Image (cartoon, rainbow, N blue to C red):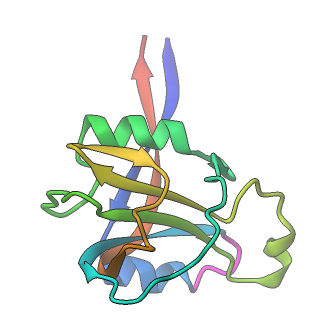
Amino acid sequence: MCKASETIRFCSCADNLENASKHSKSIYYVWTIERILGINDFAMDGLLMEDPKQLDELVAETILRKLNSKNLFDFDYKPQDNDSLEIKRVNPKKRYQKKKCIGTHLNFYYLFNKWHIGYADVFTYQLESYKNGKVEILKINNSK
């Protein structure tokens, strides 16, 4: 018996990102990795909100398990402590903004050799964009 499952891949191809925005009938997801640039020189106050656990069909716990089990990126990527990964939805047409969603983005950070749900310490560190791209959700048939 074949069972369909989904896997996720983080594609860094610029042409994929540009082409995705042309498909007005689809909702798609983009990702960004930010890396520590240095320590903030100024004090910042802020309120940390609870991390979203789901973004449409993307579930944070499922992505976390996959991030910690294999390389999901299409380039040679070695995470460093406090790397931050954000996944967010892009809606090319306003009519899709009414789609029911549970969150607007998912965030993960890398620390002590594994990914965690949440944010890197943005109040302590200055972050810079390291890499970005489009999230690909692939359907795979598994024989059972």
Q: Position of residue 127 (x, y in %)?
A: 33, 79
Q: Position of residue 13 (x, y in %)?
A: 30, 76
Residue lying at 41% horizontally and 65% vertically, measured from the top left: 121
Q: Which of the 4 image quadrants contains residue 33?
A: bottom left
Tell which of 17 and 84 is nearer to you.
Answer: 84
Outermost residue on the front side: it is 43
- The reply, left or right, for residue 41 in relation to residue 119 is left
Residue lying at 87% horizontally and 69% vertically, measured from the top left: 98
- The reply, left or right, for residue 119 in relation to residue 27 is left
Q: Main secondary structure of the magenta part?
A: loop
* The magenta segment: 22-26
Residue lying at 64% horizontally and 68% vertically, measured from the top left: 47
Q: Which of the 4 image quadrants contains residue 43?
A: bottom left
Q: Position of residue 87 (x, y in %)?
A: 50, 64
Count every numbered label the image shows and give the total.
0
Q: Which of the 4 image quadrants contains residue 12?
A: bottom left
Residue lying at 65% horizontally and 48% vertically, measured from the top left: 54
**Magenta stretch holds residue 24:** yes
Above or below, comparing residue 61 to residue 11 in the picture: above
Tell which of 122 and 51 is nearer to you.
Answer: 122
Q: Quadrant of the C terminus?
A: top left
- The reply, left or right, for residue 112 in relation to residue 63 is left
Above or below, comparing residue 90 to residue 56 in the picture: below
Tell which of 131 and 139 is nearer to you.
Answer: 131
Above or below, comparing residue 79 to residue 6 in the picture: below
**Magenta stretch holds residue 72:** no
